Image: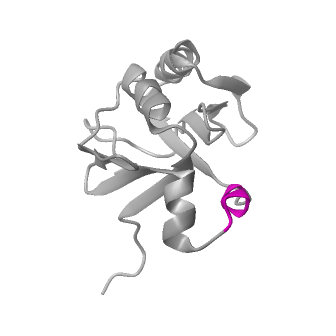
Amino acid sequence: MNANRVTLITLGVEDLKRTGAYYDAIGWRPETVLPEVAFYAMNGMKLGFFTLDGLAKETGRNKADLKTGAMTLAQNFASEADVDTAFARALAAGATSVTPPVNTDWGGYSGYVADPDGHLWEYAFNPFWELDEDGQLK
């Protein structure tokens, strides 16, 4: 068994329709949409959005406690121009700029946005990580 993997990332959201509209505007397409959860295929993985009420019920946690974990999600791109394009598309779709794309001290180019529920996304160009034609890390 390979334990060094992730097959599903689920993010809690207040309004599933609003979240769906945002991710649709940046080019994501859902695979399955149910009343309290939506799933997006990601090349062998899934990204899910679960209403905070539904996630609280399923996990037995207080809804307020579901917002206490700090994390970021990231997409790497093949160029700085691709980062700028994705960043601008996210802002146009309703994201909030956290840090605009800049040259980093580690030699890359990176910026952060927050989606409508406050989930942080990094858009980055990392010259040390090669991407295949589908945008997957080699």
At x 76% / y 39%, what residue is drawn? Answer: 105
At x 46% / y 46%, what residue is drawn? Answer: 129
Residue 112 pos. (x, y %): 66, 32
Q: How many marks?
A: 0
Residue 138 pos. (x, y %): 34, 51
At x 25% / y 35%, what residue is drawn? Answer: 133
Residue 52 pos. (x, y %): 56, 52
Examine the rendered structure and indicate whether residue 83 appears above or below residue 62.
above
Examine the rendered structure and indicate whether residue 79 appears above or below residue 44.
above
Give left or right: position of 34 versus 9. Answer: left
Highlighted magenta segment, given as a residue range: 62-67
Q: Is residue 94 magenta?
A: no
Give left or right: position of 138 versus 118. Answer: left
> Magenta region, mostly helix, strand or loop?
helix
In depth, the one of 93 and 36 nearer the eye is 36
Examine the rendered structure and indicate whether residue 128 appears above or below residue 81.
below
In depth, the one of 137 and 70 nearer the eye is 70
In depth, the one of 104 and 134 nearer the eye is 134
Residue 79 pos. (x, y %): 47, 25
Q: Residue furthest bottom?
A: 1
At x 35% / y 65%, what residue is drawn? Answer: 7
Give left or right: position of 10 versus 14. Answer: left
In depth, the one of 103 and 91 nearer the eye is 91
**The N terminus lies in which quarter of the figure?**
bottom left
